[in-house]
Image (spheres, rainbow, N blue to C red):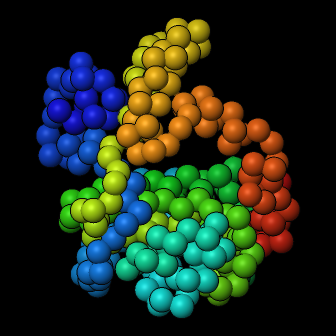
Amino acid sequence: MPAAARYGDPLATLGVLNDVLRLQLERRSVRKFTTRDVTDDELTALIAAAQSAATSSNLQPWSVVAVRDPARKARLAALAGNQSFVAQAPLFLIWVADLGRAHRLAQRAGTQVEAADYLETTIIGFVDTALAAQNAVIAAESLGLGSVFVGAVRNHPEEIAAELGLPPRTVATFGLAVGTPDPTEEADVKPRLPQAAVLHHEQFDAPAADAHIEAYDKRLSAYNERFGLRGTWSDRVLTRLAGPASMAGRHRLREILERLGLPSR
């Protein structure tokens, strides 16, 4: 059952299940692709799905850059943590929080959009971009395509902006490698925290939720061992959030956003 795989728990079930839920529960990150290209028709469908996501006040504050050129993908892969699958994927989508469109609109109208310079609007840009991209991910799954998000494009946002010719007041939020999954890849659905650790009823109950972490650590550790990896979820969280040195340069993001025209004050 998809729920059992999603939670790494053979007793996990869902009382309702349909094709959409099955796609969502079975989704996994894909980092190895066949040589088949993603067609123009498939790309158009992915973006249509993305544009069907919710957007705050219909601002639609995002854009996306589709990269297929091998040389450009190689340069982007180097900037994004030297992750080879970025270059290997037939399609690499860079999702852009785009407040530049609103500023250009204001310029043509002879007015100003001062609220675009505040943190709230920057957050809207990032949130709406993520909502759109996740829609595209599920659409890709429905077409037999696989994908993986690449947050490491935020390691060097200014260099990424230069590579893609991004206009002022925009920033690459994350990448998405897309292609047909290579069946030889050794990967599976990674178990998530049990619902009891994330779902609260009426009021937040941290002690009750956190009581389920120990069991989850054991499940994820067992999953990792299947693929020659070590460590628990707790280990990963504590290592990833240890301090600025663990952020691969992203601790400078606020100052970089300001230089890119997103003061977020």
The quarter of the picture where the C terminus appears is bottom right
Q: Judge by depth and name the residue closer to the eye, 264 or 175.
A: 175
Q: Position of residue 126 (x, y in %)?
A: 59, 56
Evaluate whether residue 102 shows in this view.
no
The quarter of the picture where the N terminus appears is top left
Q: Judge by depth and name the residue closer to the eye, 259 or 58.
A: 259
Above or below, 31 relative to 27: below
Image check: 9 left or right of 252? left
Above or below, 12 relative to 247: above
Above or below, 203 relative to 67: above
Residue occupying the point 28% across, 41% down: 25
Above or below, 195 relative to 202: below
Image check: 177 left or right of 152? left
Residue occupying the point 52% across, 72% down: 84
Residue occupying the point 24% across, 18% down: 11
Q: Position of residue 174 (x, y in %)?
A: 56, 63
Name which quarter of the figure residue 79 lies in: bottom right
Residue occupying the point 45% across, 44% down: 228
Q: Position of residue 106 (x, y in %)?
A: 67, 76
Evaluate whether residue 256 shows in this view.
yes
Name which quarter of the figure residue 14 lies in: top left
Q: Position of residue 121 (x, y in %)?
A: 67, 56
